[in-house]
Image (spheres, grey):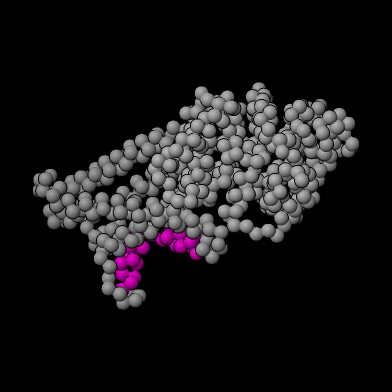
Amino acid sequence: MSFLEVTAQLADGFLTTLLIFAVTLVCSIPLGLVITFGSMSKIKPIKWLTKTFVWIIRGTPLMLQIIIVFYGPGLLFGWRALDRLVAVLIAFVINYACYFSEIYRGGIESIPKGQYEAGQVLGMTKTQIFFKIVLFQVIKRIVAPMGNEIITLVKDTSLARVIAVTELVKAAETIISLKAIIWPLFYIGAFYLLFSGLLSILLSRIEKKLNYYSG
Amino acid sequence: MAFLEIENIYKNFGKTEVLKGINFSLEKGEVLAIIGSSGSGKTTLLRCMNFLEQPDEGKIKVNGETLFESGMQFSDREAREKRLHFGLVFQSFNLFPQYTVLKNVSLAPELLAVENSEKKLSRAEKAEIFREIDENSRRLLDMVGLSEKIESYPCELSGGQQQRVAIARALAMKPDILCFDEPTSALDPELTGEVLRVIRELKSSDRTMIVVTHEMNFAKGVADKVIFMADGVIEEIGIPDEVFGNPKSEKTRAFLEKSLENP
C-alpha cells in the first residue's frame, strides 16, 4: 500500500482524533471552572458532593468511564444507546473538566488574599474581583500545568477505540491487520509527535505572551 | 458632632479579644496617627473601618450617617457602599500586577461608573465618563509624582513607587477618610521618605486621614491627634506634643523609649 492510500484510509481516524481533542478542550475548559466553584463552595453539601465526584472521576480509568457512559444508560435504565462518538465525548469532557478544575483550584488558591482585599476596599463586587483581577493572574499561573494535561489529551484520544470508535490508532490497526504492514503505526506515531510538538510551541508562545509582567 | 465617630468597637477572633472597646472621634481634615506594638489591634481597627472585618459590637458613624451598628444587617451591595466612605492603603501595596499603573488607578472608578448608571450608557456617554476618569487618574498620578510611569507595570516599579500608585488608586475613589496600614513597613529605609512625603502633602489638601505607623517622627510631624494602642485598648490619646512629649501612661512611655532606642 502506498503512502497516499494509507493516508486516505486513515483520514477518518485523523478527523475523529482531532474532533475528540477539540470538543473535549472547548467544553471541559469552562465546565472545569464550574466544578472548581463547586469544590470551593462555602455551602458544605455542594462542596463535598463536588469533591466526591472529582475523586471518583480522577480515581478511575478513563477507559472504564467511556465504557460506562456507553453501556450504562441502556443496561441500567433500558434507554436507547448513545451514539458511540457522543458517549466518548461525554466521558472525555467530564474527565478532563475534573482534572482542569483541580488545576484551576490550585491557581485560584495561589492568588494572595491582598488582591481580593484591594478589590474589596475599592468597592468592587465579588464577580468583578474574580473576572477583572483574579482570573487573569490565575490563567498566567496555570498555563504550564494545563499544557501538560492538554498534551496528555492528544494521546488519550486513542482510548476511544475501546467502544469501537475509529480514531487514529484503530484506523491504523485495521490497516496492519488486513495488509500485514507495520509502518502505518510509525506513521501515526509521528503524527502524535507532530501534534503535541505544535501544541508545545503554541503553549510556550502563550506563556511568553503572558510574561509581560511578573508576579 | 464629629466627622468620624467610633464607639465601643469590640472584635474577637475566636477566643482572642483583639479590640476591647475602642472609642474615638475625628474632625474633617484631621490626621490621626495610630501607634503601638504589633498585636495591639491597630490593623484590625483599620480593617473594621474598611469592612474587611466586621466588628462584634460597636458603632461607626461618618458625617452623621451610621455605617455600622451591632446587629445591623446589610447586603453585599450596601457593604460596598459603606466601604467607599473609607479608602485603604495596604502595607504590601496589593497593586494589580497585570494592569498598567494608569489602569490600576482607573479600573475601580470605571467599573463603578458603569454599574451606577441607571440606564444603559450610550457609547458616547461611556466614552465621556471614561475620559473624565482617565483625566482624574492622570492628575492623581501626577500628584504622587509618577506621571512618567503611567504605562509601566507594577513589577517595573520600586516599592516606594508602587506604594505611591496605591495611594493614587485609593484617592481615585474619593473616600471621605483615607486609611494607611503601615504604609512604609514593607519598604527599604531609603524609600520610606518618598512615601511619607506624599502622605504629608495630602494633608495640606484638607483630607481626613488615619495612619497606622511605626514612624514616630512622621506621626509627630503630621498628625493632629495620636492614639497609642496596647492590648486592644486605647491606652492614650491626645495631640502629638502631649503623647510624645509628656505621656501619661506608663505603657506609652515604655513603648516610646523602646522605639526611640531602635528607630
List x then y, in percent, for residue B10.
76, 52
Tell me where residue B203 sits by quadrant.
top right
List x then y, in percent, for residue B168.
58, 33
Relative to A96, residue B244 above or below: above
Is A64 within the magenta?
Answer: yes
| Viewer-closest of A45 and B205 | B205
Residue at 75% from the left image edge and 53% from the top image edge: B58
Tell me where residue B27 sits by quadrant.
top right
The number of numbered discs placed on residues in the rendered structure image is 0
| Viewer-closest of B30 and A38 | B30
Residue at 63% from the left image edge and 37% from the top image edge: B89
List x then y, in percent, for residue A22.
29, 51
Residue at 74% from the left image edge and 55% from the top image edge: B57
Relative to B219, residue A127 above or below: below
* In this picture, residue A105 sits left or right of residue B168: left
List x then y, in percent, for residue A75.
32, 75
* In this picture, residue B22 sits left or right of residue A45: right
Residue A113: tell me if it is visible: no
Residue A65: tell me if it is visible: yes
Dominant secondary structure, magenta:
helix
Residue at 82% from the left image edge and 33% from the top image edge: B239
* In this picture, residue B10 sits left or right of residue B257: left
* Segment tinted magenta in the rendering: A49-74
Is A91 within the magenta?
Answer: no
| Viewer-closest of B26 and B238 | B26
